[in-house]
């Protein structure tokens, strides 16, 4: 263990100390050194309207950091099952803190709902999940993170644009370069906006002339509502997620976020609210969402649920955020599965992805993580084998895929 730690520390130290390692990122920049790349980026910023004053103020912080690139390349997507992740992230303390914030900042929340149509509990849930209401916004210099990722080739253009957006935020007078402290990936503020989102959607809700999503709760509330309503196209007055019960006879191949039916149709198929009450016999479209297959929790996901998957395309995160919002709004805790839902271990999910890929399915990255593309492929193969098509990988499906 100590040898591993020592080796890791040495590797990080070398990565930070050696400019030569930064050259690996130069292939997508025509062979430019980091200094040459930075000169071009500053010229691009000036062409985009950023003042020389703002560029000069930011320049001491526009330095390359290999450890940021290492983090980006090594990040893992959400691999837990939904009930585990939601149990931890949508815990009671976050629900209670969310309700307390809605009371404390009642005026700002009411104003945001009136102007943007986004309910307080929706804003509060993102606020809690992203930073624990400002307690955990990150501790890394934003400009250093952004420019390092812009020089790396994995998402070079994206972070080039994000760096220029950060310079525009400085130029506009919202934040000073020294205030721009956040996560390793360059997100800023209490709901973790990328700089382009900050520049385009942040609003001054406390009237001090600045859009400060790091320190001003009213600015956080108004800005988050503006982003959800404008960029994510929130539909005023409509629900987003509701827990339901589904019968064993449900046509499982219809349970998919890409498939919508009126609530009257789901009701005809025997779907009810979680407490057994009937669904309204209306035409409001909804999908049945089964984050852990037919034996796990079940939800009706309405058109507004798309705002959650746009905010974060991890199905586990987006479902947790939507569920937490319902809890803050007064919904009961979700029902526990009647029996444990078995999840294939990491290596078997990876094997299943490999088998699916060999049959021509696009499962995205073969990484042992059950992403949306893998779920779509699983549903298709379940239909082929006459299994309930609920998109959940099982030992039986894996055995069929192995040809046993």
Image (cartoon, grey):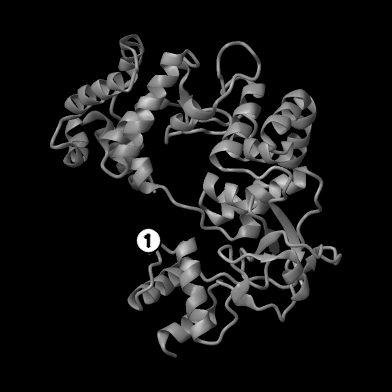
**Residue 342 location, x and y as percent?**
60, 72
Q: Quadrant of residue 253?
A: bottom right
Q: Is residue 213 above or below residue 208?
A: below
Task: Indicate left or right for 243 with 255 as reference.
Answer: right
Could you say which quadrant of the image residue 32 lies in?
top left
When asked about the image quadrant of residue 284, the answer is bottom right
In the rendered view, does 99 fall on the left or right side of 367? right
Judge whether 291 appears above or below 2 on screen.
below
Q: Position of residue 227 (x, y in %)?
A: 57, 35
Residue in the image at 78% along x and 26% along y: 106
The answer to whether 194 appears left or right of 321 in the picture is: left
Residue appearing at x 70%, y 47% in the figure: 324
Of 257 and 1, the residue lying toward us: 257
Q: Quadrant of the C terminus?
A: bottom left
- Mark 1, residues whose alpha carbon is within 10 Å: few (<14), some, or many (≥20)? some
Where's residue 226, x and y in %?
Answer: 60, 32
The residue nearer to you, when weighing 397 against 39, is 39
* Residue underneath mark 1: 365
Q: Nearer the viewer, residue 171 or 404?
A: 171
Residue extending farthest bottom: 404
Label 1 SS: loop
Q: Name which residue lies at 22% across and 39% down.
A: 25
Residue situated furthest top in the rendering: 53
């Amino acid at each position: 263990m100590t040898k591993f730690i020592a080796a890791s520390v040495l590797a990080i130290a070398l990565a930070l100390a050696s400019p030569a390692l930064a050259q690996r990122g130069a292939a997508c920049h025509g062979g430019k050194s980091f200094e040459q790349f930075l000169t071009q980026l500053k010229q691009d910023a000036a062409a985009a309207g950023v003042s020389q004053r703002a560029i000069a103020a930011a320049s001491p912080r526009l330095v390359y950091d290999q450890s940021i690139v290492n983090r980006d390349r090594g990040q893992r997507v959400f691999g837990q099952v939904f009930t585990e992740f939601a149990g931890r992230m949508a815990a009671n303390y976050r629900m209670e803190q969310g309700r307390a914030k809605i009371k404390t900042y009642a005026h700002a929340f009411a104003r945001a709902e009136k102007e943007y149509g986004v309910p307080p509990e929706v804003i509060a849930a993102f606020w809690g999940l992203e930073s624990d209401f400002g307690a955990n916004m990150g501790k890394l210099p934003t400009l250093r993170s952004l420019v390092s990722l812009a020089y790396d080739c994995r998402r070079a253009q994206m972070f080039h644009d994000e760096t220029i957006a950060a310079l525009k935020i400085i130029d506009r007078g919202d934040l000073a370069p020294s205030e721009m402290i956040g996560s390793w990936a360059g997100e800023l503020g209490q709901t973790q906006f990328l700089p382009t989102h900050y520049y385009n959607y942040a609003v001054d809700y406390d009237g001090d002339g600045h859009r400060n999503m790091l320190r001003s709760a009213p600015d956080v509330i108004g800005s988050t509502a503006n982003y959800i309503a404008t960029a994510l196209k929130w539909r005023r007055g409509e629900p987003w997620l509701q827990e339901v019960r589904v019968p064993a006879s449900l046509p499982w191949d219809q349970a998919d976020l890409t498939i919508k039916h009126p609530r009257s149709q789901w009701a005809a198929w025997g779907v009810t609210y979680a407490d057994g009450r009937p669904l309204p016999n209306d035409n409001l479209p909804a999908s049945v969402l089964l984050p852990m297959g037919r034996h796990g929790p079940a939800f009706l996901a309405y058109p507004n649920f798309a705002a959650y998957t746009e905010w974060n395309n991890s199905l586990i995160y987006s479902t947790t955020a939507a569920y937490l919002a319902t809890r803050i709004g007064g919904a009961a805790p979700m029902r526990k599965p009647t029996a444990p839902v078995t999840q294939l271990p990491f290596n078997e999910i990876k094997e299943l992805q490999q088998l699916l890929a060999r049959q021509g399915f696009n499962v995205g990255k073969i990484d042992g993580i059950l992403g949306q593309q893998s779920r779509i492929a699983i549903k298709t193969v379940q239909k082929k084998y006459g299994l309930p098509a609920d998109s959940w990988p099982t030992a039986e499906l894996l055995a069929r895929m192995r040809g046993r």
